[in-house]
Image (cartoon, rainbow, N blue to C red):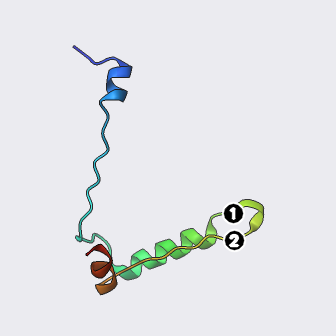
Amino acid sequence: MTKSFYEAVEGRRSIYGLSDDFVISDERLQEVLHIAITSVPSAFNSQSGRLFVSLGDYNEEFWK
């Protein structure tokens, strides 16, 4: 028997797979994020987007 749409929505759960296993290098991550932040249009061209990236020892310290 299949679930109704409402049963599926009510039973939905989000699962976050956070870990310290990295798939890409820190340099590639910084490159992709820099391009995304500088290339994405902003409201009224305000260019107010900011991003903080914590890598290496700083990242480990943050999550402790």
Q: Where does the image place residue 43, in percent across and percent down from the top left?
A: 73, 60
Indicate whether 47 appears above or below 14: below
Indicate whether 50 appears above or below 43: below
Q: Residue at x 28, y 69 (%)?
A: 23
Residue with the mark numbered 2 = 47
**Where on the picture, by quarter, is residue 8?**
top left
Q: Residues within 10 Å of mark 2 (few under 14, many from 20)?
A: few
For the view shown, which residue lies furthest in the front direction? 64
Q: Residue at x 33, y 84 (%)?
A: 58
Q: Residue at x 28, y 48 (%)?
A: 15
Question: Type of residue at label 1?
Answer: Ser
Give the mark nearest the N terminus, 2 or 1: 1
What whole-number distance in Å separates the C-alpha atoms at marks 2 and 1?
6 Å
Pick the residue in front: 40 or 10: 10
Residue 42: mark in rendering: 1
Q: Where does the image place residue 7, in percent across and percent down from the top left?
A: 32, 22
**Where on the picture, by quarter, is residue 20?**
bottom left
Q: Where does the image place residue 5, in percent across and percent down from the top left?
A: 37, 21
Q: Residue at x 74, y 69 (%)?
A: 46
Q: Quadrant where the N terminus lies?
A: top left
Pick the residue in front: 56 or 22: 56
Look at the numbered disc 2 and give the secondary structure of its residue.
loop
For the view shown, which residue lies furthest in the right direction? 44
